[in-house]
Image (spheres, helix red, strand yellow):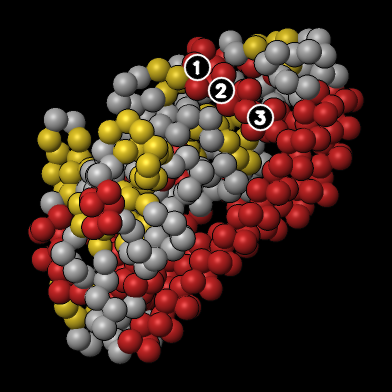
Amino acid sequence: MVSKSLKEVVLKPITGEWGTEGNNVQILRTTNFTNEGRVNYLKVVERNVDSNKIEKKKLKIGDIIIEKSGGSPKQPVGRVVFFEKEGVFLCNNFTAILRPKVDEVVPKYLLYILYCNHKFGFTSAYQNKTTGIINLQLPKYLEGTKIPLPPLDQQKKIAAILDAADAYRQKTKALITKYEELTQSLFLDMFGDPVRNPMGWELVKFDELVSDDCPLTYGIVQPGDEFENGIPCVRPVDLKMQYINLSTLKRIDPVISSKFKRTILKGGEILLSVRGSVGVISIAGESLKDSNVTRGIVPIWFDKDLANKLFFYYLYRTKPIQRRLSELSRGATLIQINLKDLRELKLIKPSLEFQNQFADSVQAIEVQKTQAQESLVQAEDLFNSLLQKAFKGELV
């Protein structure tokens, strides 16, 4: 298959503008980037930019915006998003516009190739770090990135396949979000704001609600290298607010896992992230039985005579408690919650009967949500598989 450098299939990159304080044009920033190749238009800033520059640099439908500065140790710079909105928009000076040559490449096809390039780590070879900011070496990236180029009609088919796969996973995510909103609404109706506590529920320390046999504790400190056929180990990166990504679990040496028997999972416990993405919480499925967790995860086994697991799962999902966890977080480069602070966190404790009443009310929703979560894992796996095939030139 023919391939060309990215430089050969796009026009000269268009630099971004920031302008001055004012409101004569809308400007997209990296904060408007999603990690799924789309622009989030909810919080677009307005600035004043010279009219001549606006005319020369305004975005066109089908443009790809690339992140030139930003990123993090866990997320390489070079994210891309697809612009497909009517109206006059610029992008800021931390980004650049890549305008595809439509006689060479289908814009949406190119978007997916570049998205895949970033998602699977190839972009990291073209980044450097100066004064704390990670920068993309754009000229080298344009020269070094190879784009497989099947005929244009095949590119359109590939883009359509990936669009359909992406729509499937987005639809599933939206369904899960609706289930979450429904249960959150039910929770607040029954118990009110769990931090302000307008209903006057009893307050107890978190540590008082867990089983005496399984106190709150961290997982494995140093999990070591990947170990073939080893023990699956859940890390903060594997923990999603809606599900646990089983496909990315690291396998570790059983000898290491056995040294941390206190955090070996039984299946069904709540897992709370206390490092990095602090506050992310999920419920371990039965398939995770005998797995372990790293230091960034706290497994929670509640005392069944005091606490209903489902009630506290949704308690931790509420925005007031998420804000409280954020307030407890410490650290400049590595954000984490001290275990002592977590143990002493005050939580509302309605009667077990009322907790159970709530749990019974959401059981049917939970069944549907679990099915949707399983579908989402399959949808993500399908999308990633198709992306890789497209990147290798095999999706034709």
The residue that appears at 35% across and 19% down in the rendered structure is: 331
Q: Which residue is labeled 2 in the image? A: 323
Expressed as whole percent of the image width and height from the top left, the position of residue 184 reads 73, 36
The residue that appears at 47% across and 40% down in the rendered structure is: 43
Residue 327, numbered circle: 1
Expressed as whole percent of the image width and height from the top left, the position of residue 84 reads 44, 63
Q: Which image quadrant is residue 321 in? A: top right
The residue that appears at 13% across and 44% down in the rendered structure is: 128
Left or right: 134, with 376 as reference point: left
Q: Are marks 2 and 1 in contact (CB under 8 Å)?
A: yes
Q: Which residue is labeled 3 in the image? A: 318
Label 3 environment density (alpha carbons within 10 Å; few <14, some 14–19, many ≥20): some
Q: In what quadrant of the picture does the N terminus appear?
A: bottom left
- SS state under label 2: helix
Residue 24, numbered circle: none
Left or right: 129, with 309 as reference point: left
Q: Nearer the viewer, residue 234 or 253?
A: 234
- SS state under label 3: loop
Cα distance, mark 1 to mark 3?
14 Å
**What amino acid does circle 2 point to?**
Arg
The reply to whether residue 373 is visible in this rendering is no
**What amino acid does circle 3 point to?**
Thr
- SS state under label 1: helix
- The mark nearer the N terminus, 3 or 2, is 3
Q: Which image quadrant is residue 44 in? A: top left
Q: Are marks 3 and 2 in contact (CB under 8 Å)?
A: no
Q: Nearer the viewer, residue 190 or 224?
A: 190
> In the image, is residue 191 above or below residue 185?
above
The residue that appears at 81% across and 42% down in the rendered structure is: 362
Q: Which image quadrant is residue 75 in? A: top left
